[in-house]
Amino acid sequence: MFDTVIIVDWSAANVPSPAKPSAHAIWVGLAREGAEEATYHRTRTTAEAAIMALLDTEVAAGRRVLLGCDFPMGYPTGFAGRLTGFRDAPAVWEWLAARIEDAPDNRNNRFDVAAQINTRMGGGGPFWGRPAGQVFATLPTTKAVDYDLLELPERRAVEVKVPKAQPVWKLYTTGSVGSQTLMGLPMIHRLAQRDDVTVWPFTAPEGAVVVAEIYPSLLATAVAKEDDTIKDCAQVRLLARALWRLAQKGRLPAFFEVPEVAREEGWILGAGHGALLAKALTWV
């Protein structure tokens, strides 16, 4: 049972988002007691502070929280061990938190860190995609990566199950999620330091706050029918609503039943349950 559902649409922007609420920025959806709202945030610094404060408020009020973030929390099998020496996602979060630089105005070094990782992996990947103006010898602009040669999967198991989800290695251009992941996992590391937080599926979904990966496009059809002029806003509202209603009817436990590989790679909450998520939107 969750009393509150918070859904975060993250961003890897290198400058503050416009003052006027806009697409491709950070949106936070909230569903609680049958009501819902969405808030807009111009920078990762202010968004993270708002999320932490919201968690403090909810926990202090005795409400249990499901916090969903729209980026992978793990990488394909084998990556964590090769990067950190430990075959678990939290080791990657810590590694990135120590190296990612994220200024209050959103300036960041994500492409540099990706190039460093590629160098550690032999120089041929696994990351790819960057603006033409940022040149790194070991970070190709296009998918000139041989994953068989690297001995790393291109896609996580959940991305095979949800083919529309982009591989986490793609850092730039339409649909990419790799940059959001590099900029989001340091926050997951900080969240995991809280005594009231567990991050699923790497630990059991217990405690006052459960953090999970979400994929708002599971509700793409419903989102397309909304009147919101900003898709990101509609996505966080609707997914928060659907998950909250499922929680109230005791229908979420099945969402947490995932294969063993998820304990290293992570998993999208609701993968394989898109029809039920959409149906929940119609419940009263």
Image (cartoon, rainbow, N blue to C red):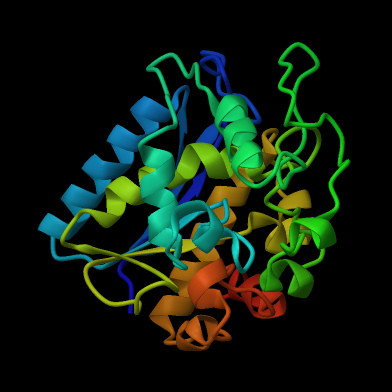
Q: Foreground residue, 150 or 220?
A: 150
- The image position of residue 227, as x and y in percent, is 71, 42
Q: Is residue 250 left or right of residue 223?
A: left
Give above or below for 34 relative to 69.
below
- The image position of residue 232, as x and y in percent, is 63, 40
At 65% from the left edge and 80% from the top edge, which residue is drawn?
A: 276
Give above or below for 161 relative to 13.
below
Give the image quarter of residue 96: top left
- The image position of residue 99, as x and y in percent, is 42, 33
Q: Foreground residue, 164 or 78?
A: 78
- The image position of residue 240, as x and y in percent, is 49, 59
Q: Foreground residue, 56 or 97?
A: 97
Counting the numbered discs, the total is 0
Give above or below for 62 relative to 193.
below
At 19% from the left edge and 55% from the top edge, which residue is drawn?
A: 194
At 33% from the left edge and 72% from the top edge, which residue is drawn?
A: 2
Q: Is residue 61 left or right of residue 215?
A: left
